[in-house]
Image: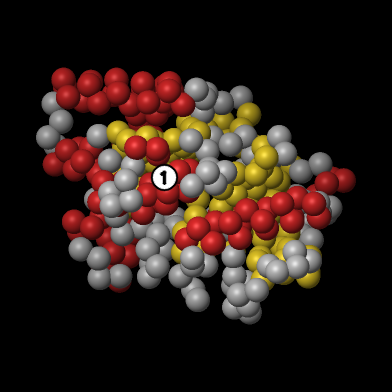
Amino acid sequence: MIKTFQEIKDDEIGLVGGKGLSLSRMIRADLPVPDGFVITTKAYGAFARGDVDDDSWADFAEKLLQAFENLGTERVAVRSSAIAEDSPNASWAGQFESFLNVRRDDLLDSVKKCWDSAKTHNVASYADEQDIKSDELALAVVVQKMVASEKSGVAFSVNPLNKNTDEIMIEAIYGLGELIVQGMITPDDYVVDKNSFQILDKTIAAKRKMMVYENGENIEEDVEAHLAEEQCLDDEDIIKLAQIIIDVEKFYNTPQDIEWAVEAGSFYVVQSRPITTL
């Protein structure tokens, strides 16, 4: 019921969902993806049907915590991965629960909450809109090593504003990326030419808030005044990130919507999905 990213095969989307398969493919291609594992749809199915007795639940919990230990980290991100999720025709971003900086003691509870989010009215309504059957909503859960994000954001391998396939757009903020995903803060915008790596445009926003992990919690705090209106990523880092974005797009051979984070000068791709708005 648990598969590491390295163990997942390309034909196992029915077990690991769209997000789980995407992360597995990228890490096996040596793209900069934090390590992790997937709790398969079989586990969700047993949970949803109520087929889990005390002994089997204890066995599952033991294996889950061992997989966590094998990552060699103190904190993880816990995210949903539905079979129908992140397909070229639909984006499920924000429909399911996700949890950042989850510690060992809270892992099992976070996984349960992730499973429970598949039963909400919002998910049912969106599935109906997309003409997705209930059996396609079988939910896997991605557990991924947490990046201690100093800066983070999203990036598009095609400029989503003018549909220019020769331009990359990068959005950047300080701290964890949750505030940008939820639309709670205006990020810096950088536009880069794919061929020359020339930075074509910069829009620097007043990034006065950021989310950080502190004293066991994800909290909002003020950005230092002298940093708030400065360029979040310097030019060298913009180019470095643009190169990674191109690598991801080439790997998938289709435009990508990417969530990224930087820790100690290293960039990581924490999620990538097809751009559905083109």
Q: Quadrant of residue 224?
A: top right
Q: Position of residue 216 (x, y in %)?
A: 56, 26
The residue under label 1 is 24
Q: Residue at x 25, y 26 (%)?
A: 60
Residue 220 vertical position relative to residue 120 in the rendered view, above or below: above
Residue 185 vertical position relative to residue 111 in the rendered view, above or below: below
Q: Is residue 246 left or right of residue 52?
A: right
Q: Is residue 123 left or right of residue 31?
A: left
- State how the image is colored: secondary structure
Residue 214 vertical position relative to residue 244 in the rendered view, above or below: above
Q: Quadrant of residue 140?
A: top left
Q: Is residue 220 left or right of residue 74?
A: right
Q: Pointer 1: residues within 10 angstroms few (<14), some, or many (20+)?
A: many
Residue 256 vertical position relative to residue 118 in the rendered view, above or below: below
Q: Position of residue 83 (x, y in %)?
A: 29, 55
Residue 179 seen: no
User: In front here: 130 or 275?
Assistant: 275
> Total number of numbered labels?
1
User: In front here: 35 or 217?
Assistant: 35
Q: Residue at x 40, y 39 (%)?
A: 5
Q: Quadrant of the N terminus?
A: top left
Judged from this view, the residue extending furthest toward the right is: 226
Q: Quadrant of residue 167?
A: bottom right
Amino acid carrying label 1: it is Ser
Q: Position of residue 217 (x, y in %)?
A: 56, 31
Q: Position of residue 223 (x, y in %)?
A: 76, 43
Residue 160 seen: yes
Q: Is residue 113 left or right of residue 70?
A: left
Q: Residue at x 63, y 29 (%)?
A: 214
Secondary structure state at the residue bearing disc 1 = helix
Q: Residue at x 26, y 46 (%)?
A: 15
User: In front here: 268 or 252?
Assistant: 252
